[in-house]
Image (cartoon, grey):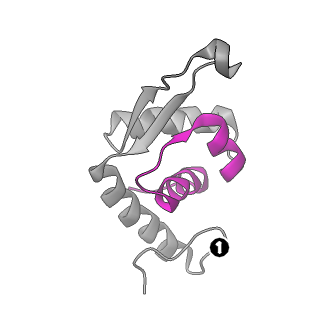
Amino acid sequence: MRLSVAKAKVLQAFLEEPAGEQYGFGLIRATGVKSGSLYPILDGLQRDGWIEGREEAIDVHREGRPKRQMYRLTALGEREARSAVAEFHRSLGARPAWLPDYGTS
């Protein structure tokens, strides 16, 4: 799979804590990817089975904010993301500072 820079950044954010959960605004802050690009990327990753989404279970009145849609990598997603990010790295020739080395050595 060929990755855009935006998709590579989103996958990188998931790979930084593969067992953790992410939410939209947190990914926007972490990656700099705009919401107009982020949400279609998340939808595609979910359709492809790379991530799973769930609605956060909180009391909105107690928390004083709306529920978030939380996303986490699936086992397939982690495997495929590592491979795709490594291929993205190789295609660039030089690794950008924001992109760690995932199996390219």
Task: Report x, y in % for residue 39.
Answer: 56, 32
| Outermost residue to the bottom | 105
Placement of 43 over or under 93, stated as above or below: above
Q: Secondary structure of the magenta portion, mostly?
A: helix
Residue at 50 percent of width and 26 percent of height: 56
Observer-nearest of 34 and 66: 66
Q: Which residue lies under the disc numbered 1?
A: 96
- Taking the image as shown, residue 75 lies to the left or right of residue 9, namely left
**Residue 10 inside the magenta-drawn segment:** yes
Task: Report x, y in % for residue 21.
Answer: 48, 43
Disc 1 secondary structure class = loop
- Taking the image as shown, residue 66 lies to the left or right of residue 71, namely right
**Residue 7 inside the magenta-drawn segment:** yes
* Magenta residues (range): 1-30
Q: Amino acid at mark 1?
A: Pro
Observer-nearest of 16 and 82: 16
Residue at 65 percent of width and 73 percent of height: 96
Task: Report x, y in % for residue 10.
Answer: 55, 50
Placement of 105 over or under 3, stated as above or below: below
| Outermost residue to the front | 62
* Number of residues whose C-alpha sits closer than 10 Å to that of mark 1, classed few (under 14), some (14–19) or many (20 or more): few
Residue 60: name its quadrant. top right
Residue at 43 percent of width and 87 percent of height: 105
Residue at 58 percent of width and 21 percent of height: 67
| Outermost residue to the top | 61
Task: Report x, y in % for residue 20.
Answer: 46, 49
Residue 48: name its quadrant. top left
